[in-house]
């Protein structure tokens, strides 16, 4: 048995029966495309989230009312939770001893920023924060300055803008010291955020940051009245004791009994990334299930092609058996041919899937990835499909009687 000869025979079969083979290989390509496309997109999303979490620093964790990623029918449970108010934050801050890097933040979207005759689209993210927000979230101010304790204490009308705001409302001019209007409030621009680009299709530069007290008074909806508390441990070694102290203090402030579950969420960068991976796993499952359905249909088509091939090559099989070819050789030959056909269709699907996944990822602001693990999965799936779909035709070919086969017209 010659493996290279079997592969060439499979390619020759595609060339001789172009339409039939192409339609069958197309169904394999679609199935593999669904698997690889979903895998590529998931890999891009996982990398983007992992990089974003890493940029925040491994010593930072947050306390908030509800989880960042919610799955299943859990909204009713979280809706009943009490707000984490700004007064709760101030009480919490006074009682914390393991770290003084504690900030309060809240945000809302859909804001319009105006300056003179210029204005933005109604899609600006407005964040209320204090002076520790920038350190805890690893946010740098490129020009001007960040908030000081005095800005928060004296409730000043100051703002720090992202680059998207700069481009839209202050074209070709320095915005530091200029005023912007947000609804009916006016703020003096004191800083410009360092450009960060987009994550998962969401621009990080299309935002304005104002003092938390101003935000809660003028812009907070019922939902955003609950603040997120961000805490940065003084070192990696102190992260766990800082988390433990924070949980204990929050439970005390909220008067929770020892047997009650926390009425708030504590999230580290690792836990947020893990929650997101649980979410992306659904996308992976969807892609795999869709791909498998298409591949089952493709397997039936491949089997039919090989059955026709066996019938067309009956005399050839008889000649091979007459000159000493063993059953195992015939069996292996047809299975190798089937695997080759599946790999041809799979190769097209892999290329299309990687391209489509990365194009969509780029549209969402993510980096290009090459999902080697998903590519290996695609190759393995096509190999298994070839073995399964080719076994019956190969068995039929192997059990042919050489005398009957030689008489076949």
Image (cartoon, rainbow, N blue to C red):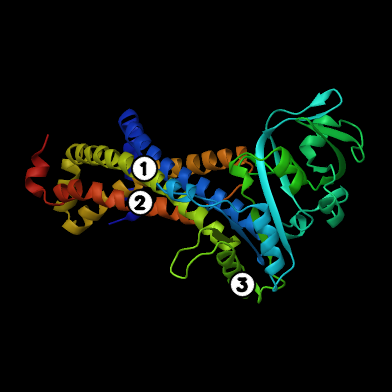
Residue under the point 65% across and 65% down: 58
Residues packed near mark 2 inside 10 Å, few (<14), some (14 to 19) or many (20 plus): some
What residue would you read off at disc 1?
A: 291
Comparing 338 with 282, the one in front is 282
| Kind of element beneath mark 1 | helix
Q: CA distance from mark 3 to mark 1?
A: 48 Å
- Whether 221 is drawn above or below 388: the answer is above
Left or right of residue 74: residue 238: right
Q: CA distance from mark 3 to mark 2?
A: 50 Å
Comparing 310 with 300, the one in front is 300
Which of the labelled discs sits on residue 381, or is there none?
A: 2
Residue under the point 86% across and 40% down: 189
Comparing 389 with 208, the one in front is 208
Corner quadrant of residue 159: top right
Comparing 174 with 181, the one in front is 181
Left or right of residue 307: residue 403: left
Residue under the point 55% across and 51% down: 68
What residue would you read off at disc 3?
A: 245
Q: Nearer the viewer, mark 2 or mark 1?
A: 1
Left or right of residue 356: residue 347: left
């Amino acid at each position: 048995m010659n493996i290279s000869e079997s592969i060439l025979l499979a390619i020759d079969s595609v060339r001789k029966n172009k339409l039939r083979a192409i339609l069958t290989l197309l169904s394999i390509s679609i199935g593999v495309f669904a698997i690889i496309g979903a895998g590529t997109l998931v890999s891009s999303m996982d990398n983007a989230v992992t990089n974003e979490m890493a940029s925040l620093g491994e010593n930072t964790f947050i306390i908030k009312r509800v989880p960042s990623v919610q799955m299943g029918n859990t909204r009713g449970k979280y809706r009943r939770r009490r707000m984490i108010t700004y007064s709760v934050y101030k009480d919490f801050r006074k009682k914390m001893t393991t770290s003084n890097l504690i900030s309060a933040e809240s945000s809302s979207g859909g804001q319009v920023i105006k300056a003179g005759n210029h204005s933005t689209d109604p899609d600006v993210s407005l964040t209320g924060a204090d002076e520790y927000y920038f350190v805890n979230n690893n946010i740098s101010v490129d020009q001007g300055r960040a908030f000081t304790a005095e800005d928060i204490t004296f409730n000043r009308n100051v703002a720090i803008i992202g680059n998207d705001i700069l481009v839209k409302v202050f074209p070709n001019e320095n915005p530091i010291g200029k005023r912007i209007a947000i609804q009916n409030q006016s703020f003096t621009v004191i800083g410009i955020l360092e450009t960060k680009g987009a994550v998962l299709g969401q621009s990080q530069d299309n935002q304005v940051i104002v003092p938390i007290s101003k935000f809660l008074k003028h812009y907070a909806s019922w939902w955003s009245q609950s603040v997120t508390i961000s805490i940065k441990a003084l070192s990696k070694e102190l992260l766990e004791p800082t988390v433990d102290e924070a949980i204990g203090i929050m439970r005390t402030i909220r008067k929770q009994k020892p047997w009650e579950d926390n009425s708030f969420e504590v999230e580290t960068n690792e836990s947020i990334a893990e929650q997101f991976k649980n979410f992306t796993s659904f996308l992976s499952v969807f892609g795999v299930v869709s791909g498998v359905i298409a591949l089952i249909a493709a397997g039936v088509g491949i089997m039919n092609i090989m059955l026709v091939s066996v019938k067309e090559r009956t005399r050839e099989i008889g000649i091979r058996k007459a000159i000493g070819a063993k059953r195992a050789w015939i069996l292996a030959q047809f299975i190798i041919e089937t695997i080759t056909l599946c790999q041809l269709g799979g190769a097209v699907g892999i290329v299309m899937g990687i391209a489509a996944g990365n194009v969509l990822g780029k549209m969402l602001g993510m980096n290009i990835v090459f999902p080697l693990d998903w590519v290996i999965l695609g190759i393995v799936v096509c190999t298994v499909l070839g073995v399964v779909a080719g076994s019956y035709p190969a068995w039929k070919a192997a059990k042919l009687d050489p005398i009957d086969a030689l008489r076949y017209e």
